Amino acid sequence: NARREHWNGHTLTREEVTAQTGIETVYMVSQFEPFITAMFNARNFGLRRGETTTEWNSFQAEVKAGRGRLALLFGPRPAPSQPLPEVYSWANKFRERFFGVSMIDAKPMVDDLRQVKTPYEQKVLEKSVLISSDAHKAGMKATAPGRFEYEVEAAIEQVYLTNGAMSWGYPSIVGSGPNSTILHYGESSRKMEAGDLLLVDAAANYQGLTGDITRTTPVSGKFSPAQKEIYELVLAAQEAAMAVARAGNKTADVEKASEEVIKAGLLKLGLITDAKGDQFRTWYTHGICHWIGMDVHDVGDYEKPLASGMAFTIEPGLYLRQQALNDLPDNPANREFKEKVATAFAKYKDIGVRIEDSFLLTDAGLKRLSSTVPRTVEEVEAWLKPSPTARR
Ligand code: GLY
Ligand code: MN
Ligand code: MN
């Protein structure tokens, strides 16, 4: 299409696609219907005269025996009163013509394929997370009192593009001071002040794969004692979770291990009064494991035990928000809770800490793909120290 190529540049030919991807058989989208029609009519499509393949033969045998199956990506089932999406009306037309062929949803197959990364995908994901790790390190260097959150965001995303990433994998979260307690803060417009914490949740999309990393750092370079207490607790929860993230366990086991640490820690800090129930949920508000891959929250079955090739996050976080207390239903138990935690809450108010790393489970065990980003208190403070050259 010469006109389209004039506007948008060259469109790959089938031969060029094969050369670039290694995929031998390539059809144009316009050939989809002729291909399907030929396949379910036992007609040759794309084979040379007299040529057959094992795949072709066995498929034809199944169709003849009335066991032909066509897998389509149907997407979410629309309610009966909603308009029929195109794939559904197409399936209806197909059914009228090719009776005896069953149609199945391709999603479970694709999801299974996505849940366990191939060696190639593992390599690309590792590279993707490495770019994101370098970006976080650059973001930390761009953090200082008087600078704006968007300056940190710019420093991070520059590293993505400089390293050949396609884009961000999800919009960067760069929240300082009270913004560190807003889970999906997206404005990046506040001026950072000495004494703030800065929570940065950001990762690149490199070749279609996205990791997920969060670091929380002190804007002035050193954690205050109160910030450090919360930080060390979140870190301990992540460590406990990592210790059980092994083949055979489920993500629920990983979450549980972190919760035990968080409950005991919050009780000790005076931020909850009872470690047995769900009080800790006031401050510990989200799940800490999700699959990563083509989407930052990738598809995958959480009932499946962890296995080699699976990639996921471990991301405990604590968010000390006034609103969390205000939102508790007004009843005697909650009034008593608020009263008892008031002093501790005043000490930790507006502190938001999340520590999130991207992991790959391998035959050799758990691999922290984002291990180059400073994470412990000591590592973070050392990285934030101005270098001798910068001081000059
Ligand atoms: N970046 C989104 C999340 O941490 O799940
Ligand atoms: Mn995450
Ligand atoms: Mn994240």
Image: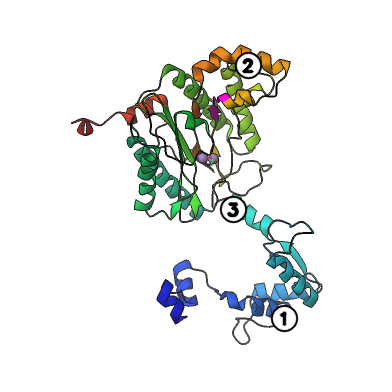
What amino acid is labelled 2 in the image? Lys
For the question of whether residue 2 can be seen, the reply is yes
Marked residue nearer the N-terminal end (2 or 3): 3
Q: Which residue is mark 3?
A: 114
The residue singled out by tag 1 in the image is 42
SS of the residue under disc 2: helix
Give the foreground label among 1 and 2. 2
Q: Nearest the camera: 277 or 151?
A: 151
* Circle 3 residues within 10 Å: few <14, some 14–19, many ≥20: many
* 151 relative to 14 in the view: left or right: left
| Residue 34 lies within the magenta run | no
Q: Amino acid at mark 3?
A: Arg
Q: Look at the image and tell me whether residue 365 can be seen.
A: no
Q: Position of residue 175 (x, y in %)?
A: 45, 35
Residue at position x 54%, y 74% from top? 26
Task: Name the residue beneath numbered marker 2.
Answer: 338
Residue 189 place in picture, x, y as percent: 42, 39
Contact between marks 1 and 2 (CB within 8 A): the answer is: no
* Depicted 154 relative to depicted 10: above or below: above
